[in-house]
Amino acid sequence: MSFRSSVHHFEGLSYTLRVSSRAKNVRLKMSPYEGLIVVVPQGFDRARVPQLVESRREWILKVQGRFDKQRQGETVSTGSSLPETIGLPGIGESWRVEYRFDPGRKGIHVRELDGNVLELSGAVEERAFCIAVIERWLNRRAKMRMSPQLVRLASEHGFVITGVTVRKQRSRWGSCSSRGNISLNLKLLFLPPVLVHYIMIHELCHTRHMNHSSRYWETVARYDPDWKEHDRQMRHAWRFVPAWFVMPDNA
């Protein structure tokens, strides 16, 4: 998207600073899993940001408390901080997860069983290990299903790309290098297909326009006439990402 991000700390408050080519004013927003996000226009004096954050401290702490309760509720509602099912609407899949403790096996072994069952066996009492294994498995599924989808979309519309990578990113849903290499966020697996398509079109159009000029958005509109609505929905797309995938390992 149109952001450059960096993480900062001030008087006990952490926030992600995003410099946006599309922003006209400073915006402070809160996300349950990303925390405080400060969006500033290009050219804005960043030295002013800490004071802006301090001026909203009471609001920030209040919302943080509400989000903490929300995340705890999500964990309690499943009875476990590990997923029992994994829905991947971005690639049209849903998996049931089974955990089998095996004291004789070192580490954790994962395998796919018939009926879209994902079995983890071994030291499954270690949450951090389980999440790491699931994340690696998700990355393989994304490379197997999502990467070819982007390649097909590029071919269909005449875009030229040099490569596709998939990795878990904190803020960006996708990016495109000047050489035409596109990177997709692993979290796209959890988004509705229409939004995944929008992000792919968004990044493919950057192979022709490495900016967010009017010509760029005209190109986006050519391949996604509803891009404005999809762009609006992406502002809240974090809601689709399950808590277990973004919560700290010590949760």
Image (spheres, grey):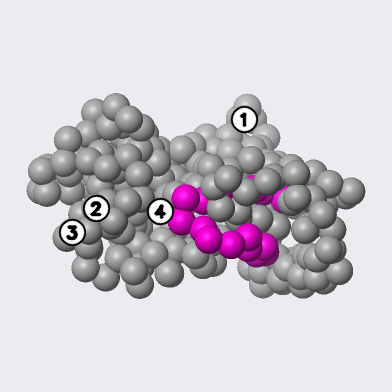
Q: Secondary structure at mark 1?
A: loop
Dot 1 amino acid type: Gly
Q: Which label sits in the foreground, 4 or 3?
A: 3
Residue 173 in view of the camera: no
Residue on which the image places disc 1: 107
Q: Which label sits in the foreground, 1 or 2?
A: 2
Provide residue 67's location: percent of width, then percent of height: 73, 68
Tell me, yes or no, whether the highlighted magenta stretch contains residue 82. no
Q: Residues within 10 Å of mark 1 (few under 14, many from 20)?
A: some
Provide residue 113's location: percent of width, then percent of height: 38, 48
**2 or 4: tag closer to the N-terminus:** 4
Q: Which label sits in the foreground, 1 or 3?
A: 3
Whether residue 36 sits left or right of residue 231 in the image: it is right
Dot 2 amino acid type: Arg
Residue on which the image places disc 4: 189
Numbered mark located on residue 223 in the image = 3
Dot 4 amino acid type: Leu
